[in-house]
Image (cartoon, rainbow, N blue to C red):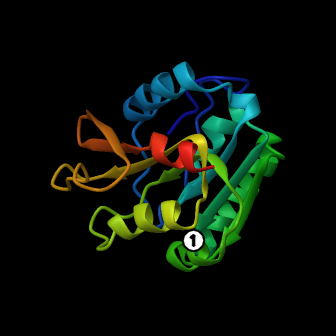
Amino acid sequence: MRIVSGTHKSKRITAPKNLPVRPTTDMAKESLFNILNNDYYFDEISVLDLFSGTGNISYEFASRGTEQILSVDVNLNCIRFIQKTAEELGFDAISTIKTDVFEFLEKHKQEHDVIFADAPYDLEGLDKIVELVFAKELLSIDGVLILEHAKEKDFSVLPYFVHSRRYGNVNFSFFEWSKKKEDND
């Protein structure tokens, strides 16, 4: 796993073998950030990284200048690894919370510009993430929720779905607020 761009471009990060993770591939991550680069100034956004695992996505945002990154994972060893790595790399922008993502979303109140969720591919109920993010209004008006998932999953029937992208075995589904929310505010 490596950081693709920014202040720590090409920095390799090796996670311990005992972490229960499947990091986003470098190719898929690079493609995802090429898409995001067209829509956001990374130094002006807030990021919520759900099921953060190794912190791979959080490090990429931090390397590109994002100053508010919250990484959430239920596994204490993952959280400790993210904290240790963020400290070693000087990424003060990364904060961590060890908790169940679904419980976190039920209680969380802060809006974010980008919410990234890379749950285990076999986890049931991923559509609940979309439901909670929009019901709790955790996404800013110009923000995006990105779900990483297996190719067998299809989220195109869910509300707020915009499009999906596939990079090898990695699939991303993108969700955004509709104009209806903007008109109601």
Residue 108, above or below 48: below
Residue 59, above or below 21: above
Pinpoint residue 87: horizontal percent, then vertical percent.
Answer: 81, 50
Asked if one can make out residue 79 in the rendered structure from this viewpoint, the answer is: yes
Residue at left offset 48%, top offset 68%: 132
Q: Nearer the viewer, residue 109 or 15?
A: 109
Amino acid beneath label 1: Leu
Residue 168, above or below 4: below
In the image, taking residue 88 as reference, residue 1 lies left or right, namely left
Residue at left offset 46%, top offset 25%: 35
Residue at left offset 64%, top offset 23%: 9
In the image, taking residue 80 as reference, residue 25 lies left or right, namely left
Pinpoint residue 18: horizontal percent, then vertical percent.
Answer: 48, 68
Residue 109, above or below 156: below
The part of the image, by quadrant, that contains residue 110 is: bottom right
Q: Nearer the viewer, residue 147 or 137?
A: 137
Asked if one can make out residue 65 in the rendered structure from this viewpoint, the answer is: no
Marker count (numbered): 1
The part of the image, by quadrant, that contains residue 44 is: top right
Q: Nearer the viewer, residue 43 or 62?
A: 43
For disc 1, the marked residue is: 105
Pinpoint residue 58: horizontal percent, then vertical percent.
Answer: 63, 46
Outermost residue toward the front in this view:
184
Check disc 1 and report its element: helix, strand or loop. Answer: helix
In the image, taking residue 10 as reference, residue 22 lies left or right, namely left
Residue at left offset 65%, top offset 42%: 59
Pinpoint residue 79: horizontal percent, then vertical percent.
Answer: 65, 66
